[in-house]
Structures are given as structure tokens and as C-alpha cells.
Amino acid sequence: MTKRDILAGMDIGTSNIRVIVGEIASDGSLNIIGVGTSPSEGIKKGVIIDLEQTVESIIRATAEAERMVGAKIDLANVGIVGTHVGLFTSRGVVAVAREDKEITEQDVERVLQAARVIALPQDREIIDVIPREFIIDDYDGIRDPVGMLGVRLEVEAMVITGSMTSLRNLLRCVNMAGYEVNNLVLNALANGEICLTRDEKEFGVFLLDLGGGTTEIALFKDGTLQDLSVLPVGGDHITNDLAVGLRTTFQLAEKLKLERGIARPEMASPENDIEIEGISGKEKRMISSVDLYNYIEPRVQEIMNLCKQEMGRMGYNDMPPGGVVLTGGVSLMKGIAELAGDTFGCPVRIAQPSYLGVKSPIYSTAVGLIHYVYHNQGLRRSGKRQERRPGGPLSSLWRRFKNFIAEIWE
Ligand SMILES: Nc1ncnc2c1ncn2[C@@H]1O[C@H](COP(=O)(O)OP(=O)(O)OP(=O)(O)O)[C@@H](O)[C@H]1O
Ligand SMILES: [Mg+2]
């Protein structure tokens, strides 16, 4: 198997590290051939706090995926949590180079390069530049200018920046685990690939990634990511509340949450049919699912309220036409879509990858990473033209990423 044929996605989350390996079939379709999961140690609220523990967790997850695939993975496409990420709009403009004024991919590369020329604080680095629209002479709203004619090519782009320290630590962990980073991709962009339809992205939708230590709110509109916010609260806080409330261990509270957790009162029963032990392992007691609900619901509601606040800050007190889509582990909580629907006053659905073996919202980010890298090259265009691009479908994204890596190690 050549390196080109397989792509690995690495989601280094607060609760779990998930590695997904995808194979690109000869007809261009993607098949998932390897899955590896390891509890994540060394990460808090999306931030690496212990290098060695993180490296070990990465090795465990990757080894599991490699065993399934029967081959060693060398290159990893790694997700970046939005905690230290900044988004802002930048413009670039260039003169079209060719004499016959046909716009080429090189012009597009140059104009995106021009959009990168911005003053940045020393501790920040540009991760990516995503075109929102191109403007050729005075015609705006163009998604893909290659092949069109014009004199002046302008781009309005979203510049994604990250904290240099966080990015370096992330790269270092992956390298220390024995892997080279092929691409760094924002988790929100990866999730968007898997969880949202083209129409949702076009007309406007909020995608909430409900993770263990973080809750990420991503706004998509006009086909691309428009805004992003990360709350340092997630499923681990629900477990914590439950452990404190029931005076039991975190492990038992987590188990109860996964097996019996509910976020709606009509799903609860007053029957005392759940046995719990105290912290010392003694003092067994019986509780009901109403008790569980009473500890779980306030935190879930709080997370949703905080999300609503962020949405308001992004300019949406009323929800966009695409409504709200949930993914991430906490979206598996029974009744959460109904609770979210009531909070946001719009339809809410839960999204997950549709591939066999990874049909769960816990895999959205890792599978999305592969999708994103496979489907999005420099211009993020779809379809036939990709085949014409010299150097293979990933070359442009790859080239830009290599420049980025070189810059941050300088
Ligand atoms: N069936 C379930 N019911 C309720 N919560 C669940 C369920 N399954 C998983 N979770 C919770 O989801 C969280 C983990 O989700 P996920 O794997 O998406 O997080 P992560 O990506 O590791 O973290 P983060 O995105 O915050 O860095 C944990 O808090 C876990 O308890
Ligand atoms: Mg996550």
C-alpha cells in the first residue's frame, strides 16, 4: 500500500484520542479501514498539559488503528481545537499574470498569499487562509475564478490563526509519537465536512461539537465557516456534577451517565432501580433515574444556554435557516436534541459519519479530518478539475502546509 492510498485522521480530544485510517479506492471513494481509540491523558479543555502522557495516548490509539490496517501509518492529519484559534477577514489583490488574462491556479495561490500579509502578534501563527469569495475586476461573489478572464483578482478570505505555543506542542507530541504531521485542520472544518449538508452550509447553520472538555460552536454560512467559539465546558463537567451530587466516584458517575443519563424529565422514572456505591466503595444505595436527571439536566441546560449566548454574540438571536446540528460524544445523551430544540427554538438534529464501523458522533472529527484533506485542496473546489491539477489532489494544501510548518519551526 503506498502512502498516497491511505490517509490517517487524528483527533486529539480532551476525553479520547481517535485515529481513523481511510483508504482511497481506485474509483476515488473513501473507505474506512482502521479505527483506534485511547482515553486521552494529558489534555485539559483541549489544551496539552502533559506532553509525555499525550504522546503515550497517541501511540496507543495509533497502534490500535495500525493493527487493524496491517500497516504502519507515517503521516497524520491532525485536528486543532478552536480554543486558541482566531478568525478574521483579510483581503488580497493581484494582477492576473497571463497575457490572455485567463486566471490560473497560480494567480489564486498568489492572491491567497497576498491575503496572508497581515500584522500578527509574535505569539500567533497563520494556520490557514480560506477564500470566502473572489472578486474579478468589479464582479464579486465568485467561488472559483480559475479559467475566467479578468485583469485584477481580489479575494476576501478568512485567516485562521493559532497560538504558536499550542501548535508547537501539538506538533511535538505527534512527532514524538513517531508520526509526521501531514496537515493541521481546524476541528470545526473537519466536523463541517461530515455533519452538514451543502444547503445547511449555504443558508446558515450552527454546528455544536459537544466534547468531553470543550463545546465548540461553529457558524457556517455562504458555504464556509464564518465564526467559531469554544467554551471550556463539556461532558466531563456533567460527570463531575453527577459524582459530587451522588457522592460517588468519577468512574461510576461516568458509567451511570453513559448507561442511564437523560436530559428530559419525561424519560425519567421514579423507581429506585439504580445501585450506586459511595467513594469508599461501601454504603451502597438505590437511586432513580429522576435523581440522575436532576443532576444532569442543569449542566446540559447551562451548556446550551452558554451556546445560545455565543450565538447571540455572533449575531443570531434567531436561529439561521439550517437550525442547529449536534455532534461529539455528549450528543449521544438521551433527550439532548429535544432539550436543545427547546433552548434554541428550532429543529435540532444529531450528526455522525455514515461509514460502517464509525457510525457515531464521537467519530465525526477524526473521519472529517480525512474527508477534509481528501476533498479540499488549495481552492476547496469539488469535482473534475481536481484531476487536472498537477501533483495530485493534495499537492496545494500540502505545499501550503509545508510552508506553515517551516514557518513555525523557524
Ligand atoms: N452515550 C453517552 N451519553 C452521554 N455522554 C456521552 C455518551 N458517550 C460519550 N459521552 C460523553 O462525551 C464526552 C466525550 O466526547 P468526545 O469523544 O466527543 O470528546 P473529545 O473529543 O475527547 O473532547 P473535546 O472535544 O472536548 O476535546 C465524554 O464526556 C463522554 O462522557
Ligand atoms: Mg472533540
Image: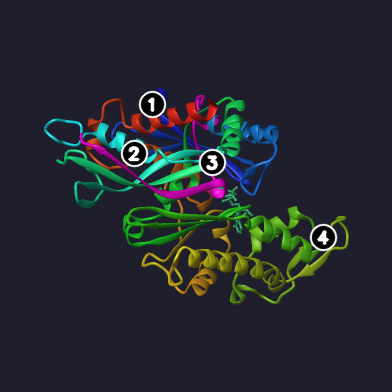
Q: Residue 232 location in percent, x, y?
A: 62, 55
Which residue is at a point 61% across and 34% down the rendered structure image? 169
**What is the distance, in whole Å, between disc 3 and disc 4 at their CAs?**
52 Å
Which residue bears the numbered disc 1? Answer: 4
Beta carbon at label 4 within 8 Å of ligand 1: no
Disc 3 vs disc 2: Cβ atoms closer than 8 Å? no
Say which of marks 3 and 1 sits in front: 3
Ligand 2 within 8 Å of disc 2? The answer is no
Precedes in sequence: disc 1 or disc 2: 1
Asked if 173 appears above or below 224 in the picture, the reply is: above
Which residue is denoted by mark 2 in the rendering?
112
Q: Secondary structure at mark 3?
A: loop
Q: CA distance from mark 2 to mark 4?
A: 59 Å
Q: Earlier in the sequence, mark 3 or mark 2?
A: 2
| Residue marked by disc 4 | 277
Secondary structure under badge 1? helix
The magenta segment is 67-96
Dot 2: element: helix
Q: In the displayed structure, does residue 130 sit left or right of residue 236?
A: left
